[in-house]
Image (cartoon, rainbow, N blue to C red):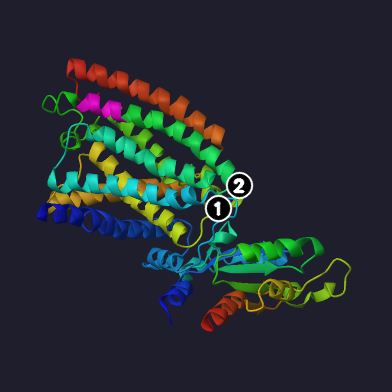
């Protein structure tokens, strides 16, 4: 009984739902504030993302007449559940080192869930703009999943010789090393940073949600509390995905003292890199994005895998 | 004051509807987002879909073609919402008063859909960005 309560506390309050929401909305504020500063504006006040979510919770929910009601309402909840599971898992691994073999694979699958939920929800909403957004999101998912998995393959090759046998696929073991301090690891880190950018739906990869072009695309028909759930989901992804990058590439977050501070610094570094990419690039077309992910990222990552294998075989760590 | 209205005042998302304006008011609306005025300080944001909006910024005399669309956009907006008539044309059809293509002004069309709609008027040709901010503040204070 107490164990069940303990698990519930982990999932719902700390470090799962509540903690990640608060952190995610703060990260949202950082994104908007830094964007504003880059554009020489003042930017929103600290609690702006909280006000936004609170306001959306109090608004009317409109459901289109032709929409498939169950899927339309269920999709945001599925997406939220996926990202909640992902963030709880990553925080538990960071804070308590409780892991299981193959959690990297589980994390990769959980990271696709929000995108799938978006695709489901928008295709259920019976709107032509949403249909365009759906098709773009599908193509984008197909585009970035391949380089993302290849980047993790590089990490697994790099760390295979450093961790004890049988734990090559466990995040706790991988997070002890920082593969970014080598040529192949650096290539993989940069490629997966851009994939994360696409997963978060930020410029230059906000093709599915382009506000001025297809009028918010995939979330066009959502209003009120359902829209608030999408916003919360995106805020939580803003915590979970950079945290995953930090754990896989940059050596993870420590549990006490300076290593904790240094770990938070790494998270902020990844976040600021994402924001700067967001603010210095125009939106790509979907064919350009596909070409970028498959051709350029693909070639770079194949080169990285070859370099990592050579380095692993001859014992050269910096390769 | 309930928490719904309180949070609505803190974060107003705006959808821009052009019902046949000459683009002058539209330029002044976009001007609000530039570094000089930066309405994101007050939590005001332009959004791409009326479903997300809390306020409709309507510009232009309502032409015969645009009237149906304006009614539809108002129905699609999730309530509570505020309608802003921006510019002389939107307020009382301005210099186009009595022209063959005009069925407006905006408040008449909106009242056909919802007699109890909250409508704010920002006069001027075009209104200054300061006037629009002042209009938003006044409209929100009566909510």
Image coordinates for residue B143, horizontal then vertical, percent:
53, 81
Specify the quadrant of the image occupied by residue A38.
Answer: bottom left
Q: Please name the residue that numbered disc 2 is placed on.
A: A129
Q: Secondary structure at mark 1?
A: loop
Q: Is residue A158 left or right of residue A189?
A: left
Local crowd at mark 2 within 10 Å, few (<14), some, or many (≥20)? Answer: many
- Which segment did they paint magenta? A152-159
Above or below — where is A60 with respect to A264?
below
Between the residue at mark 1 and the residue at mark 2, the CA separation in whole angstroms equals 7 Å
Name the residue at 39% across, 29% down: A147
Magenta span: predominant SS is helix
Asked if the residue under mark 2 is in contact with the one under mark 1, i.e. CB atoms within 8 Å, the reply is yes
Give the tally of numbered discs: 2
| Quadrant containing the N terminus of chain A in the rendered view | bottom left
- Residues A188 and A135: in front is A135
Q: Please name the residue that numbered disc 1 is placed on.
A: A220
């Amino acid at each position: 009984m107490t164990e069940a309560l303990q698990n519930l506390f982990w999932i719902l309050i700390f470090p799962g739902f509540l903690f990640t929401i608060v952190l995610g909305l703060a990260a949202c504020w950082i994104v908007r504030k830094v964007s504003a500063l880059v554009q020489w504006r003042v930017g929103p006040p600290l609690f702006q993302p909280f006000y936004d979510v609170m306001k959306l919770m109090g608004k009317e929910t409109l459901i289109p007449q032709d929409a498939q009601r169950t899927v339309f309402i269920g999709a945001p909840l599925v997406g939220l559940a996926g990202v909640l599971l992902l963030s709880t898992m990553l925080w538990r691994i960071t804070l308590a080192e409780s892991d299981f073999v193959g959690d990297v694979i589980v994390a990769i699958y959980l990271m696709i869930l929000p995108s799938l939920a978006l695709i489901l929800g928008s295709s259920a909403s019976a709107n032509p703009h949403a249909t365009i957004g759906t098709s773009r999101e599908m193509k984008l998912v197909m585009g970035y999943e391949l380089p993302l998995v290849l980047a993790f393959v590089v990490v697994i090759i790099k760390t295979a010789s450093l961790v004890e046998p049988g734990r090559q696929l466990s995040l706790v073991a991988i997070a002890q090393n920082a593969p970014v301090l080598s040529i192949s690891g650096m290539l993989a880190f940069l490629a997966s940073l851009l994939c994360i950018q696409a997963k978060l739906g930020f410029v230059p990869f906000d093709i599915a949600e382009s506000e001025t072009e297809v009028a918010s695309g995939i979330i066009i028909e959502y209003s009120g509390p359902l829209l608030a759930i999408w916003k919360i989901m995106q805020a939580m992804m803003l915590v979970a995905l950079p945290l995953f990058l930090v754990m896989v590439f940059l050596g993870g977050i420590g549990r006490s003292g300076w290593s904790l501070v240094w770990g938070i610094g790494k998270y902020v570094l990844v976040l600021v890199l994402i924001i700067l990419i967001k603010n210095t690039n125009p939106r790509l077309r979907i064919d350009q994005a596909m070409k970028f992910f498959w051709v350029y990222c693909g070639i770079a990552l194949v080169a990285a895998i070859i370099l990592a294998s050579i380095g692993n075989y001859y014992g050269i760590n910096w390769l | 004051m309930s928490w719904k209205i309180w949070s609505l005042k803190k974060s107003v998302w705006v959808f821009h509807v052009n019902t046949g304006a000459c683009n002058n008011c539209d330029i002044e609306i976009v001007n609000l987002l530039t570094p000089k005025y930066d309405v994101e300080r007050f939590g005001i944001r332009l959004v791409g879909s009326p479903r997300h909006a809390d306020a409709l910024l309507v510009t232009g005399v309502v032409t015969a073609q645009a009237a149906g669309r304006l009614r539809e956009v108002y129905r699609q907006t999730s309530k509570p919402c505020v309608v802003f008539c921006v510019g002389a044309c939107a307020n009382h059809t301005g210099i186009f008063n009595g022209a063959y293509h005009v069925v407006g002004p905006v408040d008449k069309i909106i009242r056909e859909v919802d007699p109890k709609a909250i409508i704010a008027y920002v006069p001027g040709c075009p209104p200054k960005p300061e006037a629009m901010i002042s209009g938003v503040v006044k409209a929100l204070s009566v909510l």
